[in-house]
Amino acid sequence: MSAGLTTLLSSPDALLLMLLAIPIGMVFGAIPGLGGKIALISVMPFLTGMDPLAGCVFLISLHAVVHTGAAAPTILLGIPGTGPSTAVVLDGHAMTKRGEGTRAIAAAAFASGVGGVVGMIALALIVPFALTLMTHISYPEIFVLTLFGLGFAAVLSGRYLVKGLIVTSLGLLISFVGTEPTYGVQRLTFGSLFLIEGVDLITAVLAMFAVPEMLTAKRGQQRKMRVLENDTSFMTSGVLSGLRDIVRHRWLTLRSSVLGVIVGIIPGLGGDVAAWLCYGHAAQTSRTPEKFGKGAVEGVIGPEAANNSKEGGALVPTLFLGIPGSSGMAIFLVALVPLGIAPGISFAERHSDLVWAMVWALAVSNVIAALVLILLARGLQRLAQVPPHILTPFVYLLALASIYITTQEWRFFLVLGAFSVVGYLFLRLDWPRAPFVIGLILGPETEEALVKSLSLWGTDFLLRPVAFGLVVVLLVSIHSLPRRLSRRAAQTQEAMQHAD
Amino acid sequence: MRIERAVLVALALVFALCLAVASTYRWQVALGPALASGIGLTLCILQLALTLRATEGRSIPPLFDYAHRTQFLWLGCAVGAVTLLGFGIGGSIYVFCHIYFETPKRRLVTAGLSAAATIFVVYGVFETLLQTRLFAGLLLT
């Protein structure tokens, strides 16, 4: 591992390219719709003939910091920069509306930096066991893990458990629209060709969160925020509050980072799953779960830490087995081709210094990106101070641009309009909206794992040792859930009575 | 309460329709949608029963009041302008109109500068710098 650091530090080209990759990656993350995959594709033409170490460091740094850059539009405008950022939008943007945008950005930046470093340490500790772990994880275990994720929907539903589960079912159902991946059958498309690819996640999240918030934005709200944020001491305390939040929730940061690494290692579960699992975990372990969705800082810290740490985990199957853990890592593998690198076990054995240099670059670039975001927090916060009647048209256009870049299909503008009505109704009727996205993200993974488990193992698939252990843990947590929820509901009721 | 019931009935109908459609697929393809829509339908009926039993309704703020209807109209304008005329032309016209008519004092300069900024971002940043071509509009393609 230390050889990797020496290798990285002894290459000025690699260090220079790492510093160059950080702002590029952050910009690609900050522009909604672009993200890490497009960033990697965009730089591929420049990689031919590049030194392998410098090229690898450039690519990994570029891909690693995308989520850190994405925090800015997600928190300030309510438009998720990347898929995994969707988990931050609810609480991050609520904090901005409350006049705590700087605090939210600082917390996101610190969590990203810590997530990157903890992810690297966890990776170093896990790598010797990672390949063994991977042999024990198959479809049954992935299915149970996704059930854990779906279970978080109940926690996030708060007092409205049944409504939350209805919304989760709706999210799951929407996730099944499109071509079924194994048999190629078109499902629930009702003859619409543009729905063959399914409903785009970014479109759904924008319609559920960003657009309803803009539709209901009050004119006085931004004025109040402006007064708060122009106060210099408030600005300073915003960054310090973010730092204090990380210290206060250090165990959450640590747990989310480790969870992120583990999810990253498991092929097929992408960054979206990691972020939402950690969001649900943050809500489940919080002392004030009723604040989730209304500006809980833990709802920013959990997913942000996981977003960055899972990149380290995703390197395990990618570099050690040549199996991309996510679509981003698949493009990363392709981008390594011009550098003459073919990942696999033999590559990892022969070039362990290069592998560890990449892991170090991942951690260092995360820390630098976090510092850059903290430095920019004050300037970026001004975006949120723009009055709603000027900000709203730009948010709508940015949302539409992000949809078009992601899908290349104008009909999704109409889907945005239709889903916005649903999002608006849920917002006004006080129905939980986060479970919808959890269902949407976990639906395909849950279904694929369930169908393949049933096909390969029959109904005994849950009796595999690891799957069985996970089911026991799941049943125990479900058993204690109603008691915890009712206790929390009672606490909330008591707090409301005190407030009255 | 009536609107909440209407939403529940609408969702129940969607779930029922999808359950009926899913039943025509082979089991591997139908399993996911059937489970989701079956559970959703059951929960909708349960929630509807709970809502009907509730003697007192929660106080729900009026839906689709004037301010929100106006905002929906602007959202429709944004979608319509971009769909028909694209991001460059449609987007800038929409931004100009939205800011001009929504600003209390109808500031022409602010609206004009915002529209110019939109054109710059669409053509300068996206198309030239990022080499990302945005939608040009149904009427202009």
Image (cartoon, grey):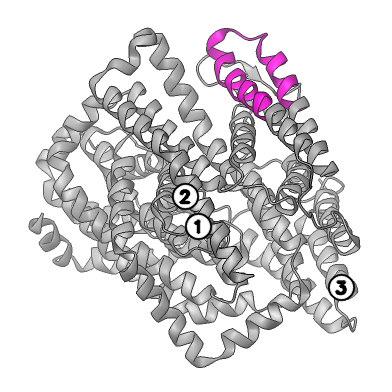
Main secondary structure found in the magenta portion: helix
The residue tagged 3 is: B102
Report if residue A243 is visible in the image. Answer: yes
Q: Residue at x 38, y 66 (%)?
A: A22
- Using the numbered discs, state the Cα–Cα distance from disc 1 to disc 2 in whole angstroms: 6 Å
Three-letter amino acid code at the position of disc 3: Glu
SS assignment at label 2: helix
The residue tagged 2 is: A487
The residue tagged 1 is: A491
Query: Which chain does the numbered disc 2 sit on?
Result: A
Three-letter amino acid code at the position of disc 1: Gln
- Tell me if mark 2 has few (under 14), some (14-19) or many (20+) residues whose alpha carbon lies within 10 angstroms of its own: few
Q: Position of residue A392 (x, y in %)?
A: 74, 66
| Nearer to me, A417 or B89 | A417
- Using the numbered discs, state the Cα–Cα distance from disc 3 to disc 2 in whole angstroms: 46 Å
Q: Point out the frontmost of discs 1 and 3.
A: 1
Examine the rendered structure and indicate whether residue B141 appears above or below residue A69: above
Confirm whether the magenta stretch covers residue B30. yes
Quadrant including the N terminus of chain A? bottom left
Query: Which chain does the numbered disc 1 sit on?
Result: A
Q: Residue furthest bottom?
A: A232
Confirm whether the magenta stretch covers residue B49. no
Examine the rendered structure and indicate whether residue A464 appears above or below residue B103: above
Query: Is the residue under label 2 in contact with that under label 1 (CB below 8 Å)?
Result: yes
Query: Which chain does the numbered disc 3 sit on?
Result: B
| Nearer to me, B112 or B70 | B70
Labels 3 and 2 in the same subunit: no
- Tell me if mark 1 has few (under 14), some (14-19) or many (20+) residues whose alpha carbon lies within 10 angstroms of its own: some
- Residue extent of the magenta highlight: B14-43
- Using the numbered discs, state the Cα–Cα distance from disc 1 to disc 3 in whole angstroms: 43 Å
Three-letter amino acid code at the position of disc 2: Arg
